[in-house]
Each structure stands twice: as structure tokens, then as C-alpha cells.
Amino acid sequence: MEFSNLIASRYSVRAFRPDPVEDEVLHRVLEAARLAPTACNLQPFQILVLHTHGRETELRRIYRQPWFVQAPLILCGVGLPRDSYVRSADQRRYLDVDVAIVMDHLILEATNQGLGTCWIAAFNARAAREILRLPDEVEPLIFTPLGYPADTPAQKERKLLTALVRYEHW
Ligand SMILES: Cc1cc2nc3c(=O)[nH]c(=O)nc-3n(C[C@H](O)[C@H](O)[C@H](O)COP(=O)(O)O)c2cc1C
């Protein structure tokens, strides 16, 4: 898909068809995550791929909306704080930025492949840790279902550029 159209056509999909995601298509989506830039190229992340079939009840403890488990797959972006870049001047850690870029790459490639996604931050982190058997030192940061959409996009509501951009100084 042409890039500007791709950006405009991505939307939060909240209804999915049960059709499987082909292995080759999943590979392209994961490859986009692998190619994402990260601070100092440290790649402090893992992508967990979850199959929803037969695990619906358990997975809905992570995020309760029924559409969360409608797609055949769920991906979780997990950050590895110990491996991430920290700015020495003020100790600011860039882990969340890195994982956001990784997930955005993945989500845009998913859109390019005709798949639907939805960023999910409002999940139960404790349930995620338990169900995904995450070690204490890693951080589940974002989930998305991954499957073929069964809904249609609404009109995009966004602030005007004039409300979002400043030039030369605050
Ligand atoms: C970091 C982040 C976290 C989000 N968390 C959730 C969530 O927990 N549940 C949900 O339904 N949507 C969530 N969203 C989706 C936003 O509500 C959505 O992206 C926004 O309303 C714009 O709509 P659009 O994605 O259709 O363009 C999240 C989006 C982002 C970027």
C-alpha cells in the first residue's frame, strides 16, 4: 500500500473474523518489528505471539473485552529494562519509546497486509505476568490482537495541526 494511504487507513479494529493469519504474513509483520530502530540499536524487546483458540477465558483475564480474543492471534510487546538505553546525563530510560516504535512498525505492516490491530495499554499487568509466565525483570507494555477485521473504520477525530505543532520556540 502507498505509505500515506497506509497511515490514513490504519485504525483500531475492535471486531475480528476467525480466519487464521498465514505463517508468511505473520513473518512479515514480525520482520517489521525486527527492523525497527531502537536507541543504540539495543533491541531491548521480545514479541510474544499468543494463539487465542482454546485460551479465550484465560486470555480475557488480561483484557476483558470480547473482541480481544476474537482474532486468532494476540501479540504482546515486552520490554527488557536491563537491556535498554539510559541517558547518562539524567538517567532517563528510553525503553517505552523503543517498544512503541517496534509496535508501530509491526502494526503498520499488519495494516499493509490487510490485518487489523488495536493498541491495548489498559490491560491487567498482573494477570499478563502470571498467564504469560513473565520473569520479574521484563515489562509487558502493549498488546494487540492480530487478525482480519470484521468492522469498518470510523471517521478519524484528530486535533488540527495548528493545535499540535509549534515553530522555533514554545
Ligand atoms: C498507547 C496506546 C494505548 C491504547 N490503549 C487502548 C486500550 O487499552 N483499549 C482500546 O480499546 N484502545 C486503546 N488504544 C487505541 C486508541 O483509543 C486509538 O488509537 C485512538 O482512539 C485513535 O483511534 P484509531 O486508532 O482508530 O485511529 C490505545 C492506543 C495507544 C496508542
Image (spheres, rainbow, N blue to C red):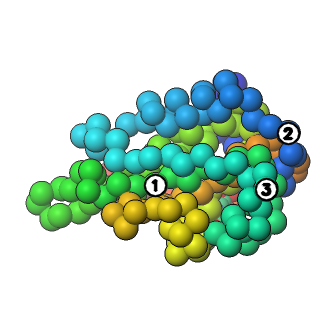
User: Secondary structure under badge 3?
Assistant: loop
Quarter of the image with the C terminus is bottom left
User: Secondary structure under badge 1?
Assistant: strand
Amino acid carrying mark 1 in the image: Val
C-alpha span from label 2 to label 3: 15 Å
- Left or right for 138, reference 149: left
Question: Which residue shows up at 79% across the image and 56% down it?
Answer: 54
State the image quarter where residue 108 is shown: top right
User: Secondary structure under badge 2?
Assistant: loop
**Whether residue 147 can be seen here:** yes
C-alpha span from label 1 to label 2: 26 Å
Label 1 or label 2, whichever comes before in sequence order: 2
Amino acid carrying mark 3 in the image: Gly
Question: Can you say whether 89 is above or below 109 in the image?
Answer: below
Q: Which residue is mark 2?
A: 19
- Residue 52 horizontal/vertical position (percent): 74, 53
- Callout 1 crowding tier (Cα within 10 Å): few <14, some 14–19, many ≥20: many
Label 2 or label 3, whichever comes before in sequence order: 2
- Residue 73 horizontal/vertical position (percent): 70, 47
Disc ID at residue 23: none
Q: Which residue is mark 1?
A: 78
- Callout 2 crowding tier (Cα within 10 Å): few <14, some 14–19, many ≥20: few
Q: Nearer the viewer, residue 84 or 119?
A: 84
Q: Nearer the viewer, mark 1 or mark 3?
A: 3
Question: Which residue shows up at 40% across the image and 48% down it?
Answer: 45
Q: Which residue is mark 3?
A: 54
- Callout 3 crowding tier (Cα within 10 Å): few <14, some 14–19, many ≥20: few
Q: Residue most toward the left?
A: 89
